[in-house]
Image (spheres, rainbow, N blue to C red):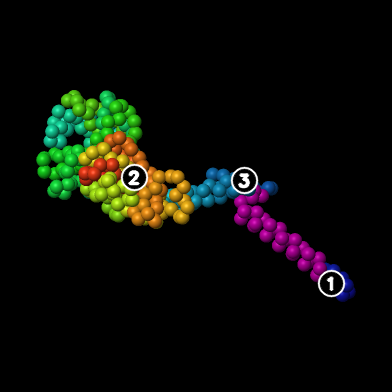
Amino acid sequence: MTSKYVVSLLLASVLLMSVAAISIQTADALKGSGSFIPKTRHKNVCGDQLCTVSGAKQMVEEKMTEKTMAEKMPAKKMMQKQMSAEHGWKTKTGTITSVQDPGVGHESHQLAIILPPSSSVYKGILTYDASENIQLVALHGPLAPGEDAGQKTWTPDGKTKFALTFVDPQNSAGSWVFTGNALAVHTKNTKPFTTSYSISYMENQPTDAVKTGTITSVQDPGVGHESHQLAIILPPSDKTYTGVLTYSASENIQLVALHGPLAPGEDAGQKTWTPDGKTKFALTFVEPGNSMGTWIFSGNALAVHTKNTEPFTVSYSVVAGQ
């Protein structure tokens, strides 16, 4: 053979081998990808589906979805658990029939306890629908000896005493934002009543801004307020308190929140309070016209006040954050 003929033969062989190799690789690739290869006697089956491009794609998507859901479910549950632990909110819905009030002196009344007495400080919102007009009750305490000094109290045995916040909304349905060591609804009637309710609440451990206490007022140290009485519940702070106060006082009181201190020139007509004539706070002064109630507030200090010269006593539960 001539050298030219040999070279041509070799080139043709290489070309045929390359085509065959490419065909085999393409077929294998198509089989591996699940693509249906025409002109074959047997169908490629993935489970109960033909291994077409669309079928394989569907299977892959389903497997990925299952895997993603399996991976996400524990994470979601863990996140929910962490959020619940962090925020501490609890919720419940129920229907309860009242019983004779076990409080001494309240034997002719009816009471339905929603949150029982606790050393924790409850904070929450109650929404109710009763069979008749009811009163709302929050307890604070128990009180230390001598702390029952004119404010309304409740006791089951004459010894263990709680300060009593008693609110009469004069309705059978409504909502109440509250704090306290116990929560109930009440009537002054002898016959039982029924109430359905939903409640969302927290049980808070005592801190400097979360507490139940009883305090006797002192002479107001504010300039121009020397003839007044003041009971400071949360002292002035450079951080802003935000929270809920529920109180029971020995007489009608005013609610006080301070804002500041003010920068020079900021006392421009609004009410202010100052202990020395130099450091000034803007003054929110609310007259609720009662001795018992709840106040949702924010400010750099919190207090209750009277314009009288004689001291008063106030028991309270406050839950605030900064």
x 74%, y 64%: residue: 17
Q: Is residue 187 left or right of residue 270?
A: left
* CB-based contact (under 8 Å), mark 3 and mark 2: no
Q: Nearer the viewer, residue 281 or 79?
A: 281
In magenta segment, residue 5: no
Q: CA distance from mark 3 to mark 1?
A: 47 Å
Point out residue 130 in the picture as x, y percentages from the top left corner.
29, 27
Residue 284 seen by the camera: yes
Check disc 2 and give the amino acid type.
Answer: Val
Check disc 1 and give the amino acid type.
Answer: Val
Over which residues does the magenta segment extend?
Answer: 10-37
Check disc 3 and give the amino acid type.
Answer: Ser
Point out residue 108 in the picture as x, y percentages from the top left corner.
14, 28
Which residue is under mark 1?
7
Which residue is the extreme one toward the left? 158
Dot 2: what SS? strand
Circle 1 packing at 10 Å, graded few (<14), some (14-19), many (20+), is few
Which residue is under mark 3?
54
Q: Earlier in the sequence, mark 3 or mark 2?
A: 3
Looking at the rendering, which quadrant does residue 129 occupy?
Answer: top left
Dot 3: what SS? helix
Dot 1: what SS? helix
- Can you say whether 31 is above or below 308 in the image? below
- Can you say whether 309 is above or below 99 in the image? below
Q: CA distance from mark 3 to mark 2?
A: 71 Å
Q: Is residue 22 left or right of residue 139?
A: right
x 40%, y 45%: residue: 271
Point out residue 320 in the picture as x, y percentages from the top left corner.
34, 49
- Can you say whether 12 is above or below 60 in the image? below
Point out residue 172 in the picture as x, y percentages from the top left corner.
30, 27
x 22%, y 28%: residue: 187
Which residue is under mark 2?
256
